[in-house]
Image: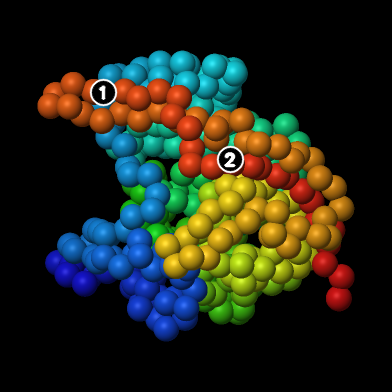
């Protein structure tokens, strides 16, 4: 690590976790490849692939360009523009210097969808598993929707997310890194802590915690089956009972030959299923790239395979 300033404790804890033996064993072939060039230079995280790049925000221009393309690409979801979440997501992205792009738009759709079935105001704690570019965590923190937000991810990705989260105005004093059972218990009881970062190799500390909602968007499909099963054990162990929203490809083959199948996740044990469909806003997307000085747009591009979403609720865990 090359850094001209003294790193914060948050940064140091996450950086140390990146080089722990447990972190290496947590990675599928997909993420082993996509973090192989990870480095930190002058406090900036570099060399992570595998999720969408950070969009560039040009005042007025990029907002209206993306909005116009979203209007054309997602014709059945034009009501999304009038939701409270569209404005909230755009506001937090503006603080991060980013546009409300294709990826962020899909998260707006997800927020609107979840609130059809779940009353967020009745919940205290949400756990997001595998949130790339803090696209889910940043808006819920900015809206102060939940008392506690837990983000579980590879520490390399959490380091990248931390930069964005701090840019959005969240105070560093309200964030902590937890790797032990006593850490998570203390953080959940501390009213000053809003965001809890958990390296993926420490996900077992979330067993039997009072978590209301788990969210996984496009990351279970990038894990091995044994890791997925460990996450489902955590979800099913919630002391309060928990909702699970899962949005992933039906089938995904990883670099090492592992095949992740949506229907092979250990779904059994839920008490209610609220939704089980092909995810309508994950069927096609648009792209923008620059050719010299001019944007070139490609519309209604299909994803590489069918993406499905499912919302279920698991009952409280009983000793």
Which mark is first along the chain, 2 or 1? 1
The quadrant of the rendering that contains the C terminus is bottom right
**Residue designated by label 1:** 296
In the rendering, at what x and y percent does residue 43 appear?
23, 62
Residue shown at 17% from the left, 27% from the top: 291
x and y, in percent, of residue 302 in the image? 48, 32
Between marks 1 and 2, how big is the CA–CA gap?
26 Å
- Residue 150 appears in view: no
Rendered location of residue 268, percent (x, y): 81, 60
Dot 2: element: loop
Is disc 1 placed on a helix, strand or loop?
strand
* Residue at the image position 79 percent from the left and 40 percent from the top: 274
- The residue beneath circle 2 is 306
Residue depicted at 51% across the width and 57% down the height:
253
Please tell me the numbered disc located at residue 314.
Answer: none
Q: Residues within 10 Å of mark 2 (few under 14, many from 20)?
A: some
Q: Nearer the viewer, residue 303 or 183?
A: 303
Outermost residue, front direction?
A: 257
Left or right of residue 236: residue 89: left
Where is 13 relative to 113, above or below? below
């Amino acid at each position: 690590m090359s850094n001209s300033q003294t790193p914060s404790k948050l940064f140091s804890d996450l950086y140390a976790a990146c080089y722990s033996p447990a972190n290496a064993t947590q990675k599928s072939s997909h993420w082993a490849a996509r973090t192989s060039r990870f480095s930190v230079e002058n406090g900036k995280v570099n060399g992570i692939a595998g999720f969408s790049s950070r969009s560039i925000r040009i005042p007025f221009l990029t907002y209206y360009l993306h909005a116009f393309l979203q209007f054309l690409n997602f014709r059945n979801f034009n009501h999304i523009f009038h939701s409270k979440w569209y404005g909230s997501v755009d506001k937090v992205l503006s603080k991060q210097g980013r546009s409300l792009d294709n990826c962020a738009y899909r998260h707006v759709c997800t927020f609107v969808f979840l609130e059809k079935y779940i009353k967020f105001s009745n919940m205290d704690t949400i756990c997001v598993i595998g949130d790339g570019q803090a696209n889910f965590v940043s808006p819920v923190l900015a809206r102060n929707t939940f008392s506690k937000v837990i983000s579980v991810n590879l520490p390399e990705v959490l380091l990248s997310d931390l930069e964005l989260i701090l840019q959005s105005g969240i105070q560093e004093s309200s964030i902590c890194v937890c790797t032990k059972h006593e850490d998570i218990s203390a953080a959940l009881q501390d009213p000053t802590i809003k965001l809890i970062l958990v390296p993926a190799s420490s996900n077992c500390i979330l067993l039997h915690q009072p978590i209301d909602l788990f969210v996984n968007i496009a990351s279970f499909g990038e894990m091995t089956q044994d890791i997925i099963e460990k996450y489902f054990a955590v979800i099913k162990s919630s002391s309060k009972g928990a909702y699970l929203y899962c949005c992933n490809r039906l089938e995904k083959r990883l670099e090492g030959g592992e095949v992740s199948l949506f229907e092979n996740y250990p779904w059994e044990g839920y008490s209610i299923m609220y939704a089980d469909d092909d995810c309508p806003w994950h069927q096609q997307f648009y792209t923008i790239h620059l050719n010299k000085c001019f944007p070139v747009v490609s519309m209604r591009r299909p994803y590489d395979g069918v993406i499905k979403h499912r919302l279920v609720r698991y009952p409280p865990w009983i000793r």
